[in-house]
Amino acid sequence: MIQQTETTQQVVPPPFPETLTGFKKILVATDFSLASDQALEYAIALARSCNSQIYIVHVIPIDLMMAPELSQASRAKLRASAEGILKKTFRAGRFFEVPYETILREGSLWPTLEALIEQNSIDLLVLGTHGGGSLQKLLIGSSAEEAFRQARIPVLTVGPGTREPLYELELKNILFATDFGPTAKKQAACAFSLAEQNRSRLTLMHVLPTGSWEEAESGPEMAIGKLRQLMPGAELHCLPLFRVPIGRPVEEILRAAKDIHADLIVLGAKSRKGLAGHVPHTKAYEVVCGAPCPVLTLKS
């Protein structure tokens, strides 16, 4: 069962923090894979829309178990290889009208990204993910999930099923899915702000669990009421829709994204320190891997 309604109010949202609407400084992490290259394309398209500057970073991993005499030679070889690939990344016209800076670092990925976010006052982190299976994720981890579980800023993750972006990023349809966690209001503010900026159609969604939902306190009518409470109190120029399906959250979110031809999904991501990126079957990671569009996560 899907409940869907539409408001007819016409009102201006209150000012939101610049980090949720400006995205003036975008950090893109690349491992030179196809997934990273597509994430970079999205970052460039977004930068053109927001007049942003891009910082492209490649982090060279350091094997602490390597013998010192071998480590130095290997690191020099890795750096030379990375510099060569970075030059190929900047093919003619790719960064037209987009200022950018390249960064090479050595170390562990997330601590390095975290330091760069602080040093450069980054507003948005952009990552690509290969969408590996549960066993692969458990063994080697998901760098993308490790980042969006810990980053203090929004993270845009581009999964393997994401469509190619246009010259500039067009957000005609935005899907905001929430479980009504403690920071749902902040996450909704980001979704509304993006919708207002881009004149997007915004769908607010909550998935009810299967079972005796008729008797549950969080039935469809109450869920729609809670979704309405997440709306800004001022005048809105976008017309939000409300969607309350019943089923498995990941399946329903992906179904809704396909139904409305979503250009962006906005999700909350629970903060996790220990084993961040190694826990299999997390909802946010499954949505990222299966989504037909980028997913913007904000840490709870």
Image (cartoon, rainbow, N blue to C red):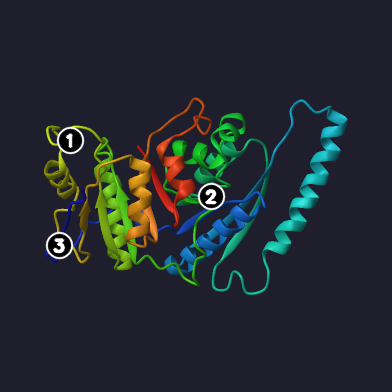
Q: Which mark is residue 125?
A: none
Label 1: which secondary element: loop
Q: Say which residue appears at 45% left-offset and 59% top-offset.
A: 24
| Residue indicated by mark 2 | 127
| Mark 3 neighbour class, 10 Å CA radius: few under 14, some 14 to 19, many 20 or more | few
* Res. 180 in view: yes
Q: Judge depth for marks 2 and 1 and give the one in front.
A: 1
Marks 2/1 in contact by CB < 8 Å: the verdict is no
Residue 35 percent across, percent down from the top left:
59, 53
Say which label, 3 or 1, has the lower sequence index: 1
Which amino acid is tagged 2? Leu
Disc 3 to disc 1, C-alpha distance: 33 Å
User: Which of the two labelled residues, at mark 2 and mark 1, occupies the earlier sequence position?
Assistant: 2
* Amino acid type, mark 1: Trp
Q: Secondary structure at mark 3?
A: loop
Residue contact between numbered discs 3 and 1, judged by CB atoms under 8 Å: no
- From what the image shows, is residue 276 above or below residue 199? above
- Give the residue pinned by disc 3: 235
In front: 120, or 166? 166
How far apart marks 2 and 1 lie (CA) works out to: 37 Å
Q: Gap in Å between the C-alphas at discs 2 and 3?
A: 34 Å
Q: Quadrant of the C terminus?
A: top left
What residue is shown with label 1?
Answer: 213
Left or right position of 228 against 286: left
Which type of secondary structure does the marked residue at label 2 adopt? strand
Q: Could you tell me which residue is drawn at 12 percent across and 32 percent down?
A: 215
Point 34% across, 67% down: residue? 172
Relative height, residue 94 to residue 279 (above, below) = below
Q: Nearer the viewer, residue 240 or 218?
A: 218
Query: Residue 238 appears at what percent x and percent y?
Result: 22, 64
Q: Nearer the viewer, residue 165 or 26?
A: 165
- Callout 2 crowding tier (Cα within 10 Å): few <14, some 14–19, many ≥20: many
